Amino acid sequence: MTEVAEVPVAERRGEGKRISHWIAGKSVAGTSGRSGPVYNPARGEQTAEVDFASVEEVDRAVQAAKEAFPAWRALSLSRRTELFFRIRKLVDEHRTDIAKLLTAEHGKVLSDAKGEVARGLEVIEYCCGMPELLKGSFSEQASTGLDVYSIRQPLGVVAGITPFNFPAMVPMWMWAPALACGNTFVLKPSEKDPSASIFAAELLKEAGVPDGVFNVVHGDKVAVDAILEHPEIRAVSFVGSTPIAKYVYETATRHGKRCQALGGAKNHMIVLPDADIEMAADAAVSAAYGSAGERCMAISQVVAVGDVADKLIDAIKQRIPKVKVGDGMSDDSEMGPLVTREHRDKVAGYVARTAEEGGTVVVDGRESAPEGDGFWLGVSLLDDLEPGMKAYDDEIFGPVLGVTRVATYDEAVTLVNENPYGNGTAIFTRDGGVARQFQFDVQAGMVGINVPIPVPVAYYSFGGWKASLFGDTHIYGPEGISFYTRGKVVTSRWPDPATSKVDLGFPQTR
């Protein structure tokens, strides 16, 4: 493999204005001559420069992973489990350090960032049970003298392409089960907030994970396409917008790879007339405006059934002034800035055109945005949205909550089911029969009942339906283990010891 220059630790973490790749157990400077800026969104200032990988640099990472695979695959489950307990311990010890990196580069408040690390850590903990997760099955005497059993084996080199909104958690959702299953990994994180991935690489090395098992390459479409087209990469996991998820899935599968590509969302929260209004309002505010709405499980559309709308909107309006927007490092901030200036302006544009399309701007977040150069936008509440309006149809991915009014439960469910996305949905009601009917009727991959953001625990799997998922398997949990392994069935017959002429060294009995 071509020799590459190692980068000092200070520069690896962005302190020296440069964030480089991680290949074969060390940080290496990029050689493509291309790079991108990394900002502190709260200050609107560039804090680092991240190297963008060339096709050749992606290949170096893949080759490092390929070379490391045979030994990693052969490592016993007990030894790999021991390493995973060390990884779990180190991530736990560095929760706050990782969270601060997230706040500095993404902008989310520190409490949200710590919550992100916690949800990623849950998947690492789940993978510590790999001896149980990777067990096969055995059938003795399937036919006379014949045994049949199944085993699961790793794929080889696999890759993950992850989004800006969860730069620690989503990579953990991928690399933890992939490594636990015996694969080696190449990660392409978002170029907007890349430092958490480099820190993860350092922690894995400190835990004792062999060089080359985990690699990180930064970049843009050049790096993405190099991963999707590389003949040595067996599987690709992706989380991002629906158009890119579709592109990733089609390109990866065209090149013979497994692919799970999780796309966008337009999550509806149905509120029935019998719902606890205070509970529903609290849920709507936290689920819509937490992490500045930059999460694929955010509630972006409330569907108010019957006469509940006015009461619910009043309750939400009462809570909105209490959502303090400020620097994520401040203890009293409840929502930080958006990730980039361009994204902030795009989100504000949806609020600006709502009235033109027939909607009602109840609260305009542009008017409450903090002063300063950060990428600030306050929270917005829009009423009277309907299908066909941009604010209703699009995945805004910002602190904008829309309200649609319908007369009946059936109309509400129809709205959810006719939406092209099917990531998550929720219903708020006191009626257990209706709730049970809803989980039967609704076409979405994750359903909350009086729970606004129904992200599954680590021992289930995360993923949507329709345009929210391209591929056959959801991420992490049992489906994640299945995705990163191949099944093999062995049928065996051995000579009968009673008739064998081989001296077995012990009495032969039937």
Image (cartoon, rainbow, N blue to C red):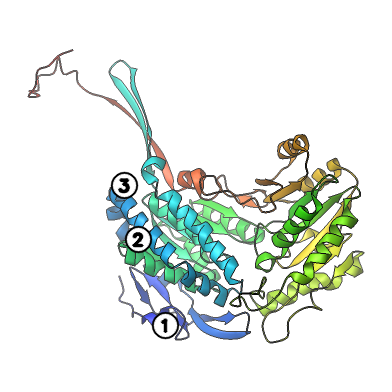
Which corner quadrant of the image does residue 184 belong to? bottom left
Residue 147 placement, left or right of 21? left
Residue type at tag 3: Leu
Quadrant containing the N terminus is bottom left
Q: Secondary structure at mark 1?
A: helix
The residue pinned by badge 3 equals: 77
How far apart are labels 2 and 1 at the CA level?
A: 22 Å
Quadrant containing the C terminus is top left
Which corner quadrant of the image does residue 398 belong to? bottom right
x and y percentages locating residue 399 in the rendered image = 73, 68
Residue 499 placement, left or right of 122? left
Residue type at tag 2: Val
x and y percentages locating residue 502 in the rendered image = 9, 23
How far apart are labels 2 and 3 at the CA level?
A: 16 Å
x and y percentages locating residue 342 in the rendered image = 69, 77
Q: Is residue 403 visible?
A: yes
Mark 2 or mark 3: name the one nearer the start of the chain.
Answer: 3
> 469 or 369: which is nearer to us?
369
> 456 or 267: which is nearer to us?
456
Vertical placement of 306 versus 336: above or below?
Answer: above
The residue pinned by badge 1 equals: 11
Q: How many numbered markers are drawn?
A: 3
> 318 or 286: which is nearer to us?
318
Q: Label 3: how many residues lie within 10 Å, few (<14), some (14-19) or many (20+)?
A: some
The residue pinned by badge 2 equals: 213
Residue name at image x 87 percent, y 68 percent: 361
How far apart are labels 3 and 1 at the CA level?
A: 35 Å
Cβ atoms at labels 2 and 3 below 8 Å apart? no
x and y percentages locating residue 313 in the rendered image = 85, 60
